[in-house]
Amino acid sequence: MLYIAGIDEAGRGPVIGPLVICCATCRRDDEKLLKKLASKDSKALSPKAREEKYQELRKFCTFRWLEISATDLNSLMNEYSLNDIEAKFMAELIKKIQDGDVMIDMPDRYSWTFRKRMEKFGVTKFEAEHKADETYPIVAAASICAKIIRDSKIEEIKKATCDFGSGYPSDPKTISALRNKEKYALLVPFIRLKWKTLDNIKQTKLFDGE
């Protein structure tokens, strides 16, 4: 195989904003350079370092990504689990690779479960491991791209609505925004309504002051 490919996502856990799944590909001849630039998972890098590495990686890597909005996730989750949704879009990206070995950062607990999901969406030729972004530089490259794309989308949403922090349930600023009636109204188009985080807030009180 002349090429290697890696797939990873950003935004699996947030209650606000899109899920971004990215595929990075490069020639095997560029693996040494790849290892120098993508030896760390994107989450271990500062935003500035992430952007600098991404610009260097773009010189010899090809990046493709799919953005699944909160609205699309809300609709898809009427039919699919989150792991199915990830597999569905990962399969779409793999089908665009003409010739290459593919490594995926596996979302499922068991490899056989994940393989069945991927087969359901028409893909059989790939490898998958947990925390592949920490072991395989090409997956780390995909992770860097996915994080940058998601972060840029989050900034766009903030400019259009309000400052809600990171969008993750562990962020007090995010929870505070969801409990604020005015901010919640602005954020509705970008909220993942199927998330348990929202149910937990509703079970206590949705809005502060009520």
Image: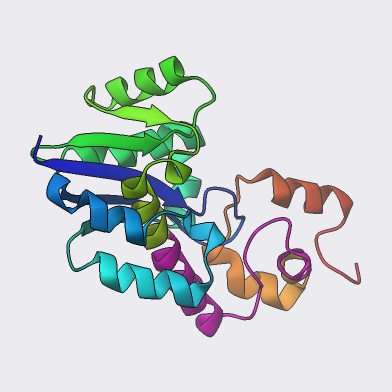
Residue placed most toward the observer, 1 or 122:
1
Assign the magenta stretch its main secondary structure.
helix
Does the image show residue 67?
A: no
Q: Which corner quadrant holds the N terminus? A: top left
Q: Which corner quadrant holds the C terminus? A: bottom right
* Residue under the point 76% across and 63% down: 175
In this picture, is 25 found above or below 135? below
Residue 100 % position (x, y)? 15, 37
* Residue under the point 34% across and 59% down: 36
Residue 50 % position (x, y)? 44, 69
In this picture, is 81 found above or below 17? above
* Residue under the point 53% across and 48% down: 12
Residue 92 in which image quadrant:
top left
Residue 75 % position (x, y)? 45, 45
**What is the magenta range?**
147-176
Residue placed most toward the observer, 153 or 98:
98
Left or right relative to 143: residue 45? right
Left or right relative to 195: residue 58? left
Q: Is residue 114 magenta?
A: no
Residue placed most toward the observer, 113 or 84:
113
